Amino acid sequence: MKRAAAAAVAALAAFALSGCGAQMTPTSAESSGTPSQPSASATVTPLDQLDVLADPATYQGPSTATLHIDGISAPASGPSQELPVTVTSHDRSGDQQITVTDASRVVAVDIAGSIADTIWALGLSDSVVGRDVAASYPGSEDVPVVTGNGHSINAEAVLALKPTLVITDGSVGPTTAIDQLRDVGVTVVYVDNVSSFDGAAQLARDVADVLGAPDAGEALARALGQSVDQVRAQVAAIAPAKPLRMVFLYLRGSASVYYVFGAESGADQLIAGLGGVDAAGEAGIKGSQPLTDEAMLATEPDVILVMTDGLESVGGVDGLVADFPAIALTNAGKNRRVVDMADTQILSFGPRSAAVLDGLARAIYAPEAK
């Protein structure tokens, strides 16, 4: 199942997301109560107006992708909420109906920080009293963290915040800790959280439904879709006729953890948005698979995508090639064509989706453009 594969990949990404503090850049939001579209400053050349590489498949050297445009911005004022509301909670043991009566003190937890960031984009972050370590919306640094190493929740820490509602996706545990919260009367709702652009839009709808603000959720989902489509159209205007073969590697040298992310991992969605070919998915890799020389030769990438901290953990491009000599035999290895991006950004689906695509596209197709 796609959801299961994405969850497995998310569990690996917990290493990268724990302890990171990159923040989304707030922008001036519209006063209508709906999220604003991504925008670029006057000094940023639009993606489809860049002086792009004539042949990006032959470009030599690594690049670091950064955010050049703003992501979705939260509205200046939050939407109205109508409670109580009964929603479907997608518990691991099976779906059940849960009635939410009070959303004034919310704890939002998942491995990637997606739920808390979504609440911020809905304009309701003032109600968030506890979060996971990966949440990175503006102001999140002032909200208590209730997760330990990125994938475990401390029930006592949650209860100390006197929450009226906990929203999670099941990617943090243990389940017994979540059960303990319910046992003492805290309302807990599980939402689906699929690592994809469409999944981010659906998460906006589902979280908004839980908070009693369905119209705001629909508006955010629409804004997310429109912003990603806009950047995708710009990418299509600059991508070569022959798509680049791309592969995403998850690296944690300090823990000897090396994986290839393939179909149904979220990386495939990212690569498609960049106008590339998901080389791992094409080679039959689903979810995540341990990185081997055989896997690298099977994917034959032109570009390798990685998390910044992950690349540093293996000693940069030189260390990566030393650990996996087969990479040097690929086009990406011969050209040292490795593109890295901050750990909390590169696979984040949600308010920053369009900005992440834009930043990666610049690093891939116009790495020397200013």
Image (spheres, grey):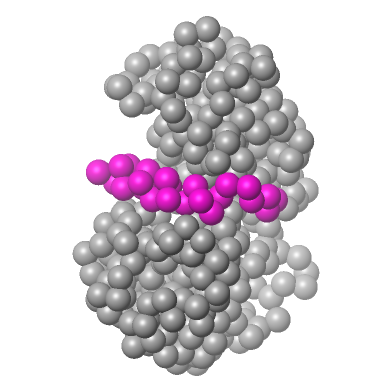
Whether residue 304 appears in this view of the structure is yes
Give 337 or 324, whichever is nearer the viewer. 324
At x 58% / y 54%, what residue is drawn? 344
Residue 41 lies left or right of residue 95; in this view the side is right
Q: Give the quarter of the figure containing the N terminus.
A: top left
Q: For the point 69% across and 75% down, which residue is it?
A: 45
Q: Position of residue 279 (x, y in %)?
A: 31, 72
Residue 304 lies, with reference to residue 92, above or below; the image says below
Residue 8 image offset from top left, x and y in percent? 35, 46
**Residue 135 rendering spot, x and y as whole percentages:** 62, 42
Q: Quadrant of the C terminus?
A: bottom right
- Residue 242 sits above or below residue 72 on the image: below
Q: Is residue 94 above or below residue 294?
A: above
Residue for point 33% across, 56% down:
288
Residue farthest toward the left in the current orientation of the protein:
284
- Helix, strand or loop: magenta stretch: helix
Label tally: 0
The image quadrant that residue 162 belongs to is: top right
Q: Say if residue 213 shows up in the picture.
A: no
Front residue of 64/355: it is 64
Q: Quadrant of residue 132?
A: top right
The answer to whether residue 27 is magenta is no
- Residue at image position (47%, 43%) is 201
Residue 273 x, y percent position in the rendering:
44, 64
Q: Which residues are magenta?
A: 1-24
* Left-right relation of 273 to 30: left
**Residue 6, magenta (yes or no):** yes
Looking at the picture, tell me which residue is in the foreground, 313 or 362: 313
**Along the line of sight, the residue nearer the viewer: 228 or 250:** 250
